[in-house]
Image: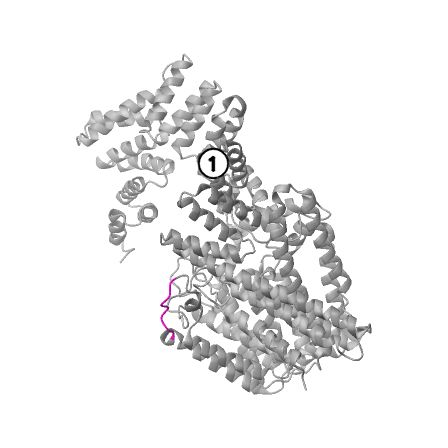
Amino acid sequence: MRDATSEVRRWLLVVCFFVCPLLFFTNLTRNPYVTQITLMHGGIAFALALWAWSASGREGGWRLPRLPVALPLALFLSAWGASWLRAYLTDQPFFRPAIVSQGATNTLFLLVVCVAAFLLSAALAAEDDGGADVPLGAWGAFALAWGLLWCAFPQARAPVLGGPTDLWALAWDPYGAFVWALGLAGALWLTRRGRQADFLHLALCAGFLASAYGVLQYFNMEVVWPYTLNPYGGRAVSTFGNPNFLSTFNVALMPIALALFVREKSAPRRAVYGALFLTLEAALLATLTRSSWGGALVSTSALLLFPRLRARLKAEPRPAGLLIGAAVLLALLWPSSSMATAYTPTVIGRLTEVENVLKPSAAYSPFYQRVLIWTSAWLMGSGVPLLGKGGGLFELFYPFYQGFLLHHYLFFHTMRTHANNAHDEILENFSQAGLLGLGAYVALWAAFFESARRWAKGRLGEDPLWTGAVAACAGVLVDNLMNVSLHFAVPAFLAWWLAGYAMGRGAREGAGFWTWKGRPVLRRAAAALLLAAAAGVGWLQVRVWAREAWYFAGFKLSRRGDLPGAQAALERSRAWGPREVNALYELGNVYAREGRASAAAGAYREALDANAGYDEIYYNLATLYGSKLARPDLAFRFYETAWAINPLSLNVANALSAYCLQDPAHRLDEALDVLRETARNFPGNPNVWNNLGYALALDKRWAESEQAFTRALEIAPGLDQAARNLAGVSARAHRPPAPILKVLGDLRALDAAISRRDGSDKTLALAASIAAREPDLAKGRFLYGSLLLARGRTSEAIPELEAAARLEPSRAASRLNLGNAYLSAGRVKEAAAQFREALKDDPGDPTALQRLKELGLLK
């Protein structure tokens, strides 16, 4: 008979395998994964502690499986800890609170979701009989019936009557609770024997349900929520919130389903596993995650490396051939998404997009954004090659390395992103734990696969769960050469659980056990310490969940303009703790809007103590210190930091340059550097050029100053301040008036003539003169081209209007007149393209809409 602790542990594992992948709230926490994350942390921690408590009371001692990966795993954890300690001791003291905060959060994830799951799975697999027999009909009936019950949820759900602060109303629904109760009851009954086979089939069940739902989403059939969930364009997210997490989950499950299919002799059972495999594949295709497609190809193909599975395929090739043929056809014929989105590629289209990688001019962001992240990761690691930048600190320091690249490479400006992780497991570990950590990580997986190779020659080589688990680990690792899913709770838990299962079964079959025969009281004391640690983890997760729920409540109230309500909710969020950057930043924003500058600055400083990598927090702090709190020294430092992180913020550039220009005797060179780079980044902004001209004039660089003011006026001829500045510079430098000043006078005369509807030859000649003297003056080229077009001189008008559109690409009028000119010339496709460009600037432009309707391109 199973003891009580084993039963509780089973309940906890049901939560991890069944509830966490499928429980998903859309309006309770801003980060939709929070409930999954907190349940997963608490469930694994307590499950491991309860196993230890049961093991500590056994008469023969505390028996642990001997794991071939134990030494490299210990070395990796040591390198991780050493790298974090190096960062804490040697990085700037300003970062230490954030180093503690970020390091603690990510280290807890590593220890609980990864290592604890791995060890618990290995321990249970070593104790397991290895059987894979399950009541497959009952599993199938349960999955179908429970899934169908959710189809009635949109009609049966109760209305949410409470406001943003009524967390119970947001989380509770009678019908939903009823369905969940039935689901838990069914899952507990089906896993009543508590074997690894039961839990892995529970994972397959959850994967089937999530996959079927994801496929329905892909075809715009929402059966759970009253609205379509479409946060990633046409890609399915199911209950995972992110297509990349669902895809990795399926990469891990597909080889298990396929191995079970191959080993089954019963045709009905084989049909169930075949249908499961195809459902998982369909959802994988619906995620449009190419790295996971590669991972799935590797994980399923890896099954061919097991001799006994190959023998089984040779003995009975027809069923597997039919299944693989169906899988290939499914991929080749997979249609585009039915969700209302501009991006709906097919599988073939998604794959052929990769050719854009070879065209840097196309700036293919899915690849080159990763290049930006990878380059930053490389710079992190290469700066401290032995130990890396610090275990768990990638997200904290990434913005500074990205900022360095943004300052130096215009190409990456459209790729700027927030990165939690490196999108590559090799660079992930090198950047944070250096060569020592990366070496240990590589050694861990080398030991894993070498052990699996040896064990595959024995009985394990014909076990579908074991072979599927080993193949799944290979696929997930390949997937995460361009993915981040190994660092998010649900896919990471499954991957490490499967790795533990593979190693634990190996221990049972030959690697052996290590037995601690110490005094029972010492074993109990060690287990009690683990229970206490699990209790600490559990309480921390309660606090994290409450903090996130109250943060989102305050966020919503703030957006509604209810500042007192938002303040109360956000202060409750802060009281629950631990520190979290977004919640504290939002609290600082509310304080600032209420005029409480000192309190706002305090909240912003706390936010930086949680994660010091957000340029907007530095900018807000600098603004408060400069305008409200009379600390210009701190304002300048924080503006500098914001600029280092994000040179693409015009507000930051303007503020920093203004501060520098307040002290030209000491900071003029810095102001010039900032303004020159800002003019490069924002070449169409006249105010930037005007400010640069002013700074150059302070440095008595008269010619350069005139050029900057001239450029400002070419962009914005009506910018009177730039005209006055230009005239003043010419006078101070004893230079003749700049030519553009005369042109601007003529342009005013041309405007006056056009406003009088004077389209005479004299007016046309004046426009031609302006266009010839100032070819970079967009307005002049536009007016000249428009006058030519009005006279029917289309061939002459087109070059002028093309120049105007090139100089001012976001001006709808230039696009419209150019489109009209193309139409007059019979260039219909080019005309339609210009009308569409005009709609990007002004989506409701009646002329552009009418032209497209006339061309039959709009209904």
Residue 346 shown left or right of residue 559 in the figure: right
Quarter of the image holding residue 69? bottom right
Q: Residue furthest top?
A: 734
Residue 1 shown left or right of residue 362 in the figure: right
According to the picture, the residue beneath numbered tag 1 turns out to be: 629
Evaluate whether residue 569 shows in this view: yes
The spot of residue 1 in percent (x, y) is: 68, 87
452 shown above or below 557: below
Identify the image quadrant of the C terminus: bottom left
What secondary structure prevails in the magenta region? loop
In depth, the one of 267 and 522 nearer the eye is 522
Evaluate whether residue 371 shows in this view: no
Magenta-drawn stretch contains 616: no
In depth, the one of 706 and 263 nearer the eye is 706
In depth, the one of 220 and 729 nearer the eye is 729
Q: Of the residues shown, which amino acid type is indicated by label 1?
A: Leu
**Which residue is depicted at the point 59% across and 81% down?**
319
How many numbered marks appear?
1
Tell me which segment is drawn in magenta: 157-163
The spot of residue 415 in percent (x, y) is: 51, 47
In depth, the one of 710 and 331 nearer the eye is 710
| Mark 1 neighbour density, 10 Å: few (under 14) some (14–19) many (20 or more) | some
508 shown above or below 529: below
The spot of residue 399 in percent (x, y) is: 56, 45
700 shown above or below 290: above
**Which residue is depicted at the point 28% across and 56% down?**
858
Q: Specify the color scheme.
A: one colour
**Which residue is depicted at the point 64% across and 62% down?**
477
At mark 1, the secondary structure is loop
The spot of residue 841 in percent (x, y) is: 33, 45
